[in-house]
Amino acid sequence: MKISAEQAFDMMADHAGYTAFPGVRSAKVTKPGTTEPNGLGAIREVALRGAWVEEEITVFERPRRLGYKIVRSRPPIEHEGGLIELTPTADGVDVVWTSIFRVKIPIIGGLLTRIAARQMTALFTRGLAIGEERARSRPAA
């Protein structure tokens, strides 16, 4: 990405900004984090097209790592955790997103997991592109 690690981290940590991403209907913090509203320990709800998740922020190391765990969801998801890692580069930042989950619905859960993985990857990729467009359109400080 052609933005800084700080800009990318801020974009991914800011729940309120998620509604600018395609497919996100609403996002809110229901319990603030220990050091800042979106920080470590924060609980946030995100409503997507056809799904809803409640996640807890489990890692908050500005501007390098942001981790989360889905604790409740519709459809039901078994989530081992997700982690966004940011590495500054000469041109901006490299972003690696990892999330291990499965949809817990008998018989069709495997298919739904594969579909959800593709949709979440597309959502994440589009969200990064939107963040990069926004950062480039802001005047320099």
Image: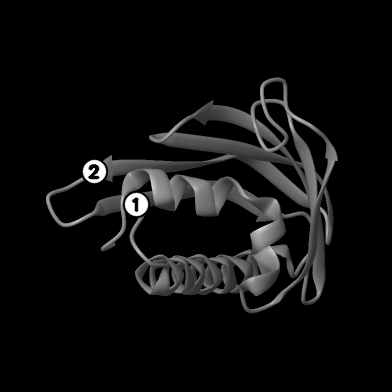
Mark 1 lies on a secondary structure that is strand
Label 2–label 1 contact, CB within 8 A = no
Left or right of residue 117, residue 29 in this image: right
For the point 61% across and 73% down, the residue is: 21
Question: Considering the image in quadrants, where does the C terminus appear?
Answer: bottom left
The residue closer to the viewer here, 104 or 61, is 61
Q: Indicate the amino acid at tag 1.
A: Val
Give the residue at mark 2: 88
Q: Is residue 95 above or below residue 121?
A: above
Density class for disc 2 (Cα within 10 Å; few <14, some 14-19, many ≥20) is some
Residue lying farthest left? 90
Give the residue at mark 1: 95
On residue 125, the disc is: none
For the point 41% across and 51% down, the residue is: 7
* Residue 1: percent from left, percent from top: 28, 62
Residue lying farthest front? 141
Density class for disc 1 (Cα within 10 Å; few <14, some 14-19, many ≥20) is some
The residue closer to the viewer here, 98 or 10, is 10
* Residue 59: percent from left, percent from top: 55, 28
Q: Is residue 16 above or below residue 78?
A: below
Left or right of residue 133, residue 82 in this image: right
Mark 2 lies on a secondary structure that is strand
* Residue 128: percent from left, percent from top: 44, 65
For the point 39% across and 68% down, the residue is: 132
Left or right of residue 93, residue 64 in this image: right
Q: Indicate the amino acid at tag 2.
A: Pro
